[in-house]
Image (spheres, rainbow, N blue to C red):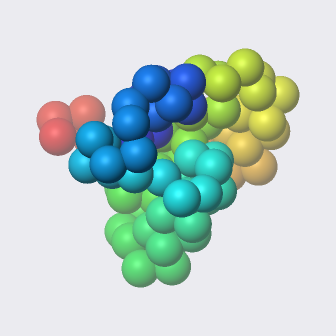
Amino acid sequence: MYYKNDSLYAKFPAGGEIYLLTKPSQEVISQLVDLVNFKGTSKMKVKAALCQAYHHGLHGRFHEGRDLLLKTHVGESIHLQDIGS
């Protein structure tokens, strides 16, 4: 969901899409990231923050994505992450 633009969902008829969004995708992704931050491991939290920042960038909200990355300090600890999986 994080890599799809909202305009893509508008192209599908109401019953044709498997993942029908009833709320804006930004709100849904924010709720999912909050859940990961509450229950996930540190690796999951980093991935969730990166996915959310990518989603902001995809929709032209570059400043929000930048602020998110600065707030979570992902840039400072990304070199410590395992890239194998």
Q: Does residue 4 appear in this view?
A: no
Q: Is residue 50 above or below residue 42?
A: above
Image point (25%, 33%), residue name: 83
- Return the x and y of residue 26 as percentages of the image width and height: 63, 47
Q: Observer-nearest residue: 32 or 37? A: 32
Res 62 quadrant in image: top right
Image point (54%, 59%), residue name: 22
Q: Assign the N terminus to one quadrant of the image.
A: top left
Q: Is residue 55 above or below residue 24?
A: above
Q: Observer-nearest residue: 82 or 39? A: 39
- Return the x and y of residue 39 as percentages of the image width and height: 41, 79
Image point (66%, 24%), residue name: 59
Is 64 on the left or on the right of 54, as rendered?
Answer: right
- Return the x and y of residue 65 as percentages of the image width and height: 71, 33
Image point (45%, 68%), residue name: 36
Q: Observer-nearest residue: 45 or 79? A: 45
